[in-house]
Amino acid sequence: MDKRIKIALAALIVRFAIAPFFMHAGDLGTIYESSAIALHGGNLYSFVYQQTVQMQQATGLPIFFEGYAYHPLLIYFFVPFYWLYTLIAGPGLVFIGGHFPNLPVLVYPWALFAIFMLKIPIILADVAVVYLLSGFDTRKAEFYAFCPYVIFISVVWGMFDAIVAVFLLLSYLTFRKNSYALSGFAYGLSTMKLYTIVLLPLFIVRLWKQWRALGEFLLGFTVTLIPVAYYMIASPVVFWNVLVGFQGSRVMGGVNLYNFVWIIPDVQFDLLISKLPTILLIISVLAIVLLYGRKLPLLEAILAVMLASFVFGAVLNEQFLVSILPLMLLSKRCDPRIWIAPFIFVFLRSAFYYFAIPILWTSPYFYDLYFQADTVWKYLQTVGYLTIPMYAVGITFSLLLLWNLIQVLTSVDGPWVPRTLSRTIRMRRK
Amino acid sequence: MQWSRDFRLRMKILTIFFIVYVIVLSFIPLVHQIFIAQSSWLGYGTGAYAYQSPSYFVLFNDPYDGSSKPNIHVNPSSAPNDRISILEFSDWTSYVDGYNLFNDFNVTIRASGDGKVLDATYVRPGLTLQKLIDLSSDAVQVKMIASKEINAHIELWKWIMTSVNAISTESKPTVIPTGTSINFTFNDQSLNAVGEGQISLSRVPTQIEIWPFENGFNRVTIDFINSEMTFTVSGSITQPGQVSWSYGDLPYVLPVIAIVVVISYLLLAERYGQENKNRTSRTHR
């Protein structure tokens, strides 16, 4: 058997074996609820909007309900699998509640099957990344296939950054082959988690004055915006509030230097200072795009913009690194071992047993153990013992991202070589 | 081999800027705690509010939690960052006209314009009840105002009170003589601190009952029939117990962490960068 297929199959088997037994109840619950709404033709954003309005009216604070606040296209990757699930298991609810801070009610045995089915798109994205990477270097493919961090985020957590990763990778590969419409389409799909939107100015600058290529790219990109246009026309207030309102007014934090904000119990102040990273993000992305956007090789240019947005941007969740890990593996400038920092952070921010709810909810004995462990965990949280390592890991990760950013930027101005030799290198690269 | 001087300079400036940025930002929680967080109701999380006065810290939980409505803490003078709970009003276990305050009312919470008073308004058909929480330098006032005369059963919790109005041991729930003042002593379980507290009532209630737990009591229930009642709560720590780490110490620790991490990074980046540079140089040779 072809080695590429062997690695992809191995990645698939590992993920299938883990998938049904673990989840992040809040995030997978959102996908489960949203899939049901989308399948029945409902408005994805209405529920989140109503909850947000209710919270704001009750508290008088600019706070948002954390539900489905993604690109509308995203849910259509999950809906076919949810539909298949309902064909087999029937339409009954098997996953009830689970939005933070509540815990879900699971109906067995179908809950495990639902969890498994909803993770299939993520697993397929992971396997596609492995297959594509193995076309370049099987060791890099193996790195991604068996990286504990990637496996954890995709099949233990059930977070879909692997889908962002595969489309970002496809966008890069098709751009390199001058298939600009496809590249624009793949890039548009990668914006389903919105944080890749920072790459749009880069693609435009790269294609500036190549009007036909730019037109093709933007056409491909625009196709992916059709569902956005639909929601903007059908329910502008709801859509704007959930997507732009929530994403635009998020309090900074995550695996970065900004998570100190979590110890400041003042949401108005937190929102005010969260504007600072947004300003720095805009400045840094524009500076990189304008100064290095055309000088850097495409791969390094994409990485530079993404890394700068991660270094300076307000929110950097544990899973975001998955999206650029395949590109980091392709670049000789990056050190992909930085996954260790967000992986450690996962276990400082969330209790490890929270991810094992599908197993722990199977027996009253395990259920009781959950709450015993939770008492200890909540104590550690309340007294602030977990805040200190979280802050240290956050700063460390920001600094490691900065280090990688500098390494990537050296692609344009790295070790000095005679002009004739550098020209030869460039020719070879082409 | 040599690196472009201009590029190296740019990267150095970027690194220095970022390091200064990290360290400066690490002081923000401390600046907020000292200059902004004092003596004003501030909202956070999913809708909770907190107030830090020079001697009291009061937490009013979000609308999705029936505990700490409010929870009154005292800051011991020997350890001002410590917060020792002296009394917790519970909506889970309090009733007005037979309706549970947490489950049977819609609640809206607002801080007054100047941030000094917190107004929690409980509404159900035919009845509106306001809880106004106000802090002075020596006490916390919880004022309940209803739209009509109500029959209220309010539960106040503390784990544990060693005595209430000089009664220190009872084996079953006991109704004590009514009055406008309830004095209690407590032993804080987490810090082993010993303290005393006082609840002054604006009117004589119909009943005061104390509930035994372990070697003392863990709650006082107050029943009254009226449209208004004010609970003025004060307390102090008489024996500090063990001084320990407190959540309030975090703002002082974060800058230290930031500096340590940044220095470690500079040392490691210098070493690793040098190795990387040598490796790149060898490759180019």
Image: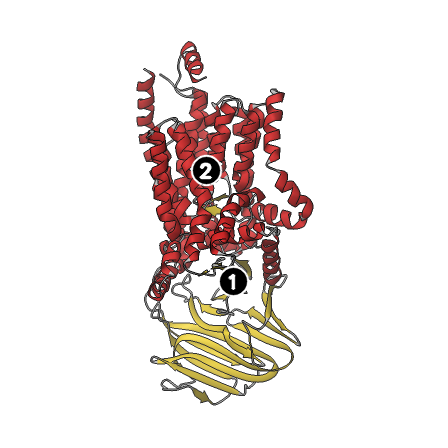
Q: Chain of mark 2?
A: A
Q: Nearer the viewer, residue B20 or B213?
A: B213
- Please identify the quadrant where the C terminus of chain B is shown: top left
Quarter of the image where one finds residue A361: bottom left
Q: Which residue is mark 2?
A: A323
Q: In this view of the protein, which residue sits in the foreground, B47 or B28?
A: B47
For residue A351, above or below residue A427? below
Q: Which residue is mark 1?
A: B50
Position of the N terminus of chain B, as image quadrant, is: top left
Element under disc 2: helix
Task: Give the label, 2 or 1, closer to the camera.
Answer: 2
Name of the residue lying farthest toward the bottom = B177
Q: Position of residue A109 (x, y in %)?
A: 41, 58
Q: Which mark is residue B81?
A: none
Q: Is residue B116 above or below residue B21?
A: below
Q: Position of residue A156 (x, y in %)?
A: 39, 48
Query: Which kind of residue does numbered mark 1 sit on?
Result: Ala
B251 or B47: which is nearer to us?
A: B47
